[in-house]
Image (tube, grey):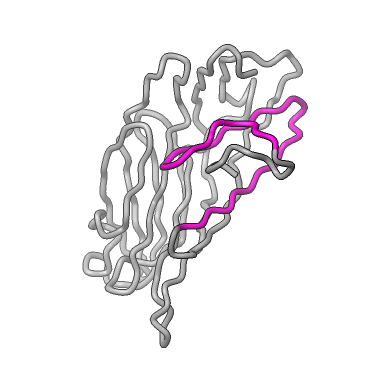
Amino acid sequence: MVSTGFDGNGRRIAPPFQGDGELKCFASGNSLTGRALIADNAGQRIAYSAVAFRKLRNDAPTNFVSLDGVNYEACPDRLHFNVLAQTATSNSELILVPCTQNLEAQIFSSVTLQYAVINELEQTFSGASSFRCMERRTFNTVPALRFSSIGTNTAHLIVRGVEVPVVGFVIDRFQVTGSGALSTSSNEPYFEGSREATLDLPPEWP
């Protein structure tokens, strides 16, 4: 449990954590898979899979991780989602982090995001925003994701980080027709292309 830092056997394996953040895990031999389950105070829950980067060489790991397609798998160039447009009953949330991070020096990447949104009529809309360290953005703050802008209830969303590549997912949030109950679910992207990124970790990590 991230909130307590204890594993299933009652052992503390990490400091307790509250708030927004991300969890990074490393293992030799490409032996890990990951999945997270998150619940809020209202009882809404979502689960999503970890983004994994395989080590491609058999040399010893270091605290400098090169996601270049030679040492480790590279980051994706673009993220593709099928999403619900923002309406009076739907306001999903986009969550992103940069692939390039310097955690040793605590230098956080600044990223300009480019959006391409294709509606059900194959019309294309575009937009841009920027963030530093981590992005949590509801669809009502992105004009290209509003029904009032694109005119259809669903759309194909393509996200690209300009300075560095990004990874992330969408939390679908909408009211169920008829009951009005709030529904949430994870919406994981498929990846297009590849770009290099680097991860500088504190020396004690590997």
Residue at x-position 65% and y-position 31%: 13
Residue at x-position 33% and y-position 64%: 91
Q: Is residue 146 left or right of residue 92?
A: left
The x, y position of residue 202, in whole percent, is 53, 15
Q: Is residue 96 above or below residue 150?
A: above
Q: How many marks?
A: 0
The x, y position of residue 89, in whole percent, is 32, 74
Which residue in the rendered view is the most extreme toward the bottom? 178
Q: Is residue 73 above or below residue 64?
A: below
The x, y position of residue 195, in whole percent, is 49, 30
Asked if the stretch drawn in magenta spans residue 120, the answer is no
The x, y position of residue 112, in whole percent, is 30, 35
Q: Is residue 202 left or right of residue 34?
A: left
Residue at x-position 27% and y-position 71%: 151
* Quarter of the image with the N terminus in it: top right
Q: Is residue 57 left or right of residue 151?
A: right
Where, by quadrant of the figure, is residue 92 drawn?
bottom left
Residue at x-position 51% and y-position 22%: 199
Q: Which residues are magenta?
A: 11-40
Asked if the stretch drawn in magenta spans residue 33, the answer is yes
Q: Is residue 43 above or below residue 127?
A: below
Of helix, strand and loop, which mostly describes the magenta segment? Answer: loop
* Quarter of the image with the C terminus in it: top right
Where, by quadrant of the figure, is residue 42 drawn?
bottom left
Q: Nearer the viewer, residue 167 or 104?
A: 104
Q: Nearer the viewer, residue 15 or 111?
A: 15
Q: Is residue 138 above or below residue 9?
A: below
